[in-house]
Image (tube, rainbow, N blue to C red):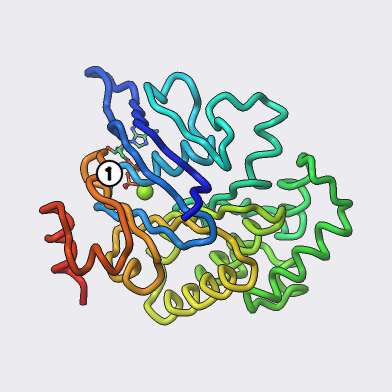
Amino acid sequence: MEPLVEVRGLTIEFPMRAGLLRAVNEADFVIPKGQITALVGESGSGKSTMASAIMRAISVPGRVAGGSITFDGRDVMSLGKKELQAYKWEQVSMVFQAAQNALNPVARIKDQIIETFRAHSKSYTEKQMVDKARNLLDYVRLDPDRVLNSFPHELSGGMKQRVMIAFSLLLDPQLVILDEPTTALDVITQAYIFDILKKIHKDMNITMLLLTHDIGVVAKAADRVGVMYAGNVVEAGDVYDMFKRPKHPYTAKLMKAVP
Ligand code: ADP
Ligand code: MG
């Protein structure tokens, strides 16, 4: 197992009126290259916060009170402005929680793609970018021309989620983080999205981190899993092993919830 991301002793704190809220507490977590890793835990356990730190979507310093994150052996915390631009979206991309709502309601999808990705160092022309988007939209089984010319409100929730997944692949990242990618969707659409994610993982050999509060999702999609509880990564390992022999009491409780 070759690690792509190594998180060591990561501590993240948010300033609150009555002191600091420790959202992630000395967490150790590894994302192996080429696998689907899930991070599971109840709402508020720190999944999104840890993933945002990996994506460098959280301000460092200020929030990150300790620990280290490396990506392919490089220190993620100390990336400068230029390096960050070549890191975010090009090395790591993230489909944020409720990403469907992140689309600009008053801009056509096509214009949003151009706007979002223009600034990146992998300098595609606008035409190359849109052609690439077209291929990816087709790949996630959407009608590219229809979608590119649509405003967000013209698309269903599941369609928007697939648009965001296609967006996340535009700059050929090595790692895609998906934060609760199916939480707001009906079960049929959920299954459909998982099919697509598995296909992307297989065809493109992309490493994935899947954040979810749903242990059923882990059983369906992941190779490896980390379990978070109250800011701590209480357990991590092979999905099969964990289902068979959970070590932490919280994990054991979680396993009982598997349908
Ligand atoms: P999860 O993704 O597992 O639901 P989060 O990482 O979103 O958990 O949240 C972990 C804890 O950090 C929660 O108590 C949450 O309220 C808090 N938190 C998350 N983001 C912020 C923020 N920007 N400011 C203050 N507190 C936050
Ligand atoms: Mg979350």
How far across and down, in percent of the image, does residue 193 sit? 49, 73
Q: In the image, 124: left or right of 116?
A: right
- Asked which quadrant contains residue 65, the reply is top left
Query: Which corner quadrant of the figure contains ligand 1?
Result: top left
Q: As rendered, which of 233 and 193 lies closer to the eye?
A: 233
- Asked which quadrant contains residue 137, the reply is bottom right
Residue depicted at x 76% and y 41%: 120
Residue depicted at x 49% and y 44%: 5
Q: Which residue is mark 1?
A: 233
Q: As rendered, which of 61 and 108 lies closer to the eye?
A: 61
Asked if the residue at label 1 sits under 8 Å from ligand 1, the reply is no
Q: Mark 1, residues whose alpha carbon is within 10 Å: few (<14), some, or many (≥20)?
A: many
How far across and down, in percent of the image, does residue 232 sit? 25, 40
How far across and down, in percent of the image, does residue 236 sit? 29, 52
* Quarter of the figure that contains the C terminus: bottom left
The vertical placement of 76 against 186, above or below, is above
Residue depicted at x 72% and y 28%: 82
Secondary structure of the residue carrying numbered label 1: strand
- Asked which quadrant contains residue 50, the reply is top left
The tally of labels here is: 1
The vertical placement of 147 against 234, above or below, is below
How far across and down, in percent of the image, does residue 147 sit? 70, 70
Furthest toward the bottom, the residue is 188
Q: In the image, 67: left or right of 19?
A: right
Q: Amino acid at mark 1?
A: Val
Q: As rendered, which of 238 and 80 lies closer to the eye?
A: 238
Residue depicted at x 10% and y 53%: 249
Furthest toward the front, the residue is 1
Q: As rendered, which of 162 and 56 lies closer to the eye?
A: 56
